[in-house]
Amino acid sequence: MPEFNADADPKERVSFVSSGLSIAEAEDPNRPKRVLGLRDLILFYVVTGISLRWIATAAAAGPSSIVIWIGAWFCFYLPLALSVLELSSRYPGEGGLYVWSKHAFGDFSGFMSAWTYWTSNLPFFPAVLYFAASNILFMRENAWAHFSNNAAFYVVFSLITLSLATVLNIVGLDIGKWLNNAGALAMWIPAAIVIVMGLVAWHRYGSATSFTVHSMTPSTHFNDIIFWSVLTFAFGGCETASFMGEEIKNPRRTLPFALIIAGVTVALCYIGGTAAVLLAIPSNEVNSLQGLVQAVSKTASRVGFPGVLPLAAFLIALSNIGACGAYLGAVARLPFVAGIDRLLPPAFGSLHPRWKTPWVALLTQFVLGVVFILLGQAGTSVKGAYDVLVSLGVIFYFIPYLYLFGAMIKLQREPAGTQVIRVPGGKFAAIFVAAVGFLTTALTIALSLVPQPDEANKPLALFKVLGGTLALLLVGVWLYSAGLKNKCDFRT
C-alpha cells in the first residue's frame, strides 16, 4: 500500500484520496477501508430524505398535497436519483457534486456548487432543530406548553443539539453514523403510529377530511403554487452520500440498491403520513411546526391511547436531530476537498490528529450555524424565523442542483465506460431527465423568494431571504478569488 504524505502537493493528495482510500485511511492505512454498508446507506438516505416536518406542512395544505407529492417525486426525485447514479459511477470518490461540477464547468463552478450546498445547511440546521424543539414539548404537553412561543427555548435547544451532532461527527463517521441510524429508525415509529391510529380513527369516527376529486386537485393560485416548492425541497438529499464515496462499501453496487429502496420508502412515508394526518384532524387545525405530533395527540385521545404521545414526540425530535447530524457530517467533505485543492484555506483540508475527520470544516459549520440560529430569530416570531430559514435553505440548497443537472447534460458528450450506470434509454433519455430536473429546480428557487402569505412582516422576510442569499454568494466569490490567488502563489 502506498504511503500517504500529509505535506504532499495538493494534486497528489486528491489523487490519493480518489484512488480508493477513505479520508481516514489516507492518514491511517490500518483503519478499515469502508464504514458505510447497504444498511447504513439506506438509513442515511432515509434520514436525509425524509423529514417528518414536511408531513405536517403538506397536511396543512389539505388533500391536494398528496397529488403534489406524487408530482414532485416524478419531476424532481426521479431525475435527481438517476443523475446521481450516473454521475457517481462516472466520477466515484470523495467530493460528489464538487467533482461533477468541476469536470463539467471548471474550477469556479465546482467551488460555487460546493459552497452553496455547504452553506445551504447553515439555515437548514436551525430550521430542522426548531421543528425538533417544537415537538419535544409534547413529551410533557401540559407542563411545557408555555414554551411553544418562547424564542429563548428554541434558540437554546438548537444550540445544544447542534453541539451534540458536531461533537459526534468530529469523533468520527463510524461513531456519528449511529446518530444518523437512530434518527432514521426514529422516523418509522411515529409515522407508523400516525398511520395506524389515523386508520383506527377513520374506522371508528370517519375521516376528518373530505377526500374528493375537487379537494385533491391542486390549486393554481399563486400562493398555492409557492407551496409546491416546499414539497419539492422535501425530496432532496439522495445526492448527499456521494460526498462520502470513498467511505461506502462497494459503492457501484450499494448506491443503486440504496437509492431505489430509499426512494420508494421516502415517497410512501410522505404520502401515507400526510393522508393519515388528514384522516385524524382537519387541515385547518394543522400547524406546520407541530402538525404531526398534534395529529398523534388528538388521535391518541380519540382512540384511547394518550400514553403514546410522549414516545412519539421524543422520536419525532430524535429523527430531526439525526437528520441534522447526517447532513453535518456529509457536507463537511466538500470544504475538505476544496481545502485540498487550496481553494479554501489549507486548514480545511486537514484531518483531526486523533479521529481523522475534517474537524475544521465541522467546527466552521457549527459556528456559522449558531450565527444563523441567532439571526433567523431576530425581529420576528418563532414561526416567522422558521419560515425565513426554510426559504433561505430551499434557495441555497437548490442552486447546486442547477449545477448537478447541468453537469449531467454536458457530460453526456463524454464516452461512458463499462462501469458507468446509465439512465435507461441512453444519452437522449439522460438529457431529457436532467432537463426536467433543471426546470423543476429553477421554478422552485423562484417560488421560494416569495414570503409566506401569513407572514406579518413581508418586506423584512423578503429582505432577509434576498440579503442572506446575496451575502453568501458574494462571500463564496470572494473566497474563490482569494483561494485562486493563494493556489497560484503556492505553485510559484
Image (cartoon, grey):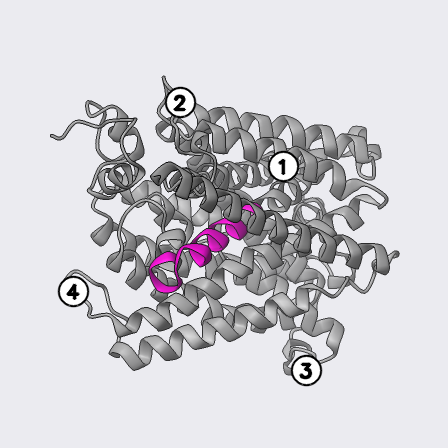
> In the depicted view, which residue is nearer to us: 414 or 430?
414
Write the residue at 50% across / 36% down.
Answer: 325
Quick check: 428 above or below 90?
Answer: below
Q: Which residue is mark 1?
A: 369
Q: Residue 46: in sight, yes or no?
A: yes
Q: Label 3: few (<14), some or many (≥20) within 10 Å?
A: few
> In the depicted view, which residue is nearer to us: 180 or 490?
490
Reading the chain from its start, which is encountered first: label 2 or label 3? 3
Q: Position of residue 196 (x, y in %)?
A: 55, 52
Q: Which residue is mark 2?
A: 352
- What's the magenta region? 102-120
Between circles 4 and 3, the one closer to the viewer is: 4
Residue type beneath disc 1: Gly
Residue type beneath disc 3: His
> In the depicted view, which residue is nearer to us: 268 or 166?
166
Residue type beneath disc 4: Gly
Is 31 placed left or right of 286 in the picture?
Answer: left
Judging from the image, what secondary structure is the residue with disc 3 in?
A: helix
Q: Which residue is mark 3?
A: 214
Reading the chain from its start, which is encountered first: label 2 or label 4? 2
Q: Position of residue 82 (x, y in %)?
A: 34, 66
Please tell me how many numbered marks the rendered image carries: 4
